[in-house]
Each structure stands twice: as structure tokens, then as C-alpha cells.
Amino acid sequence: MLCADHYVRSLKPDSNLHLMRAGDGEMYVVKLACGSRRERLLATECLALRLAADFGVPVPAADTIRVPQEFIARTPPLADAKPRGAEHLAIKHIGSGRRGQVIDLFPSAWDRPHTAPASTTAAAVFAAWTECITPPRAIYWREPDHRYLPHVFIGFGACFAGGSWAVAALPARLQCSAAPDADTFGPEAFWWEAALTRISASSIRRYISELPGPWLADIPSEEILRLPSRLMSRAEALHNLVSAQAFAI
């Protein structure tokens, strides 16, 4: 587990986003566990980021970070937030090593031809798989000799039915009709067909077991137990949908 050793600043006024340096020397955006709802969202985002990395979606590294009580007490912005416990969510800072290179969440019209369609489609497939109510968004930056703009996706707090973990067994587009919709995803979706078959219930359970217990306290235990099997059901359904679309192209 990471451990915070230096507070840099708050990233937004009155927000739960704090920039800190951890013991490994890297900079992280730290989201504090403040109240049961916030802890549930930390569990949602941490699990989604780990699954997205396995899936092949470009995402920043995420881990739990220990922020000691004495560290909080001597840092007014943290003390004012009144975090619960010592374990919080750390997401590696996108700007590390790329000062002045980050563009923004929405590249200009000039940049759009240089955004990678495959990873954008991967994020769309992943959002459908995890029932992400608000799809993740990409941050881009420029680097020499890259055909496509390097990027990562952020914003996974709305996965698993908006953080409720009450995920439906089938994607909504398949609940009313078994007929595949060829316009559901972009033509690059077939690249991610194999990713859906790599998903395993055991890895989902392992990631859940590694989450801090307080983060899961506000999630109904039956939803926690059902989530792996429901995600597996959704993965199979989406795999069939993507396969059918690939043959139709």
C-alpha cells in the first residue's frame, strides 16, 4: 500500500481531490473517504480502474493510499474534509513527467483525427459491460513521433449502475431483443472481442477482496456477492454482440 508523505495542494476548491506525493516519489490525485457514500464510490472507481487496466483501456495506475491521522491533523485542507479512516484512493497524476503537455478533456478539431479510435471504442465497450451511467472521458497530451495523441481515461465513479453495484444481468440493449444492433459500437469493437473472453469471476472477486472493508460497508452484501456473476453474464452477452457486429462489417 502507498503512504502519503507530502501534501502539495487541493486540485479544486471545496472538492475531494488532493495532490500528494507518496513514499514511492510519485505524485497522486488522492480522493478521501469522507462518509459512506464517498467510500462506496471509492470502491467503485478503484475496482473499475483495475478491471479497465486488465481489459486494455488506457487508465492511470490506481491503488489505496494510507494517509496517517497525524498527517491529516497538520494539513488544514485535509483536516477540514474530516476523512474517515486512514485508507483512501490514489490515482497516479496524469501530468507527472508531462509538464505543459496535457491538452484537455476535449481535443480541438485539429487534434481529433489523431485520437485513437480503438481505445475510444474499448472505453465504450467497457462502459457498456460495467453499466457505467456516465461514460469515462479521455485526457490527451502531445508527444513527438506519435501518430495518435497519448491519452488515458478517467472518471469511472459511475460504473456498476452508478455506484450502486445493482448491475443488471444483461445490458439494456439486449434485455428487450436478442437481435444485435450493428450500430452499437464503432467498427473497431472486434479488436476488443478477446478482452471480453479474458474476464474471469475469480479476478473480479480477488479485486473486491483487496478493497478496504470500510469502502464496502454501505454496499448491500448481496450486490457484492452477485456482482462477479452478473459481470460475467454481461461479458458473454457483449462478446456475442461484438462478434455478430464484426461478422456483419
Image (cartoon, rainbow, N blue to C red):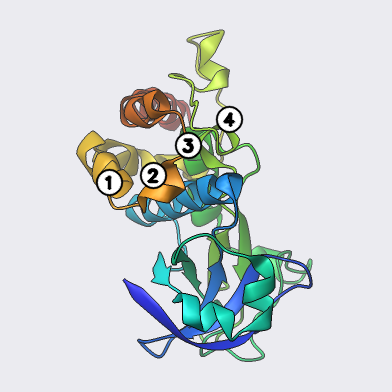
- Work out whether residue 226 or residue 213 is closer to the camera in this orientation and state it: 213
First in residue order: circle 2 vs circle 3: 3
Separation of disc 2 and disc 3 at Cα?
A: 15 Å
Residue occupied by mark 2: 192
Question: Does label 1 or label 3 sit earlier along the sequence?
Answer: 3
Label 4 sits on a secondary structure element that is loop
Closer mark to the observer between disc 2 and disc 3 = 3
Relative depth, front residue between 189 and 130: 130
* Residue position for label 4: 184
- Decide which of tag 2 and tag 4 comes sooner along the chain: 4
Q: Nearer the viewer, mark 3 or mark 4?
A: 3
In the rendered image, is residue 146 in sight? Answer: no
Q: What is the spatial separation of the Cα atoms under label 2 and label 4, in whole angstroms? A: 14 Å
* Residue at figure coordinates x 38%, y 23% from the top left: 222
* Residue holding disc 3: 130
Q: Which amino acid does label 4 sit on?
A: Thr
- Which amino acid is tagged 2? Trp
Q: Which residue is drawn at 50% across and 55% down?
A: 119
Q: Nearer the viewer, mark 1 or mark 3?
A: 1
The residue pinned by badge 1 equals: 209
Residues 179 and 34: in front is: 34
Asked if 6 appears above or below 85 in the picture, the reply is below
Return the disc, 2 or 1, that comes first in the chain's sequence.
2
Q: Circle 2: is it few (<14), some (14-19), or many (20+) Cα within 10 Å?
A: many
Q: Indicate the amino acid at tag 1.
A: Ser
Q: Is mark 3 in CB contact (under 8 Å) with mark 4?
A: no
Q: SS at mark 1?
A: helix
First of labels 3, 4 by sequence position? 3
Residue 28 point in image, percent of width and height: 50, 77
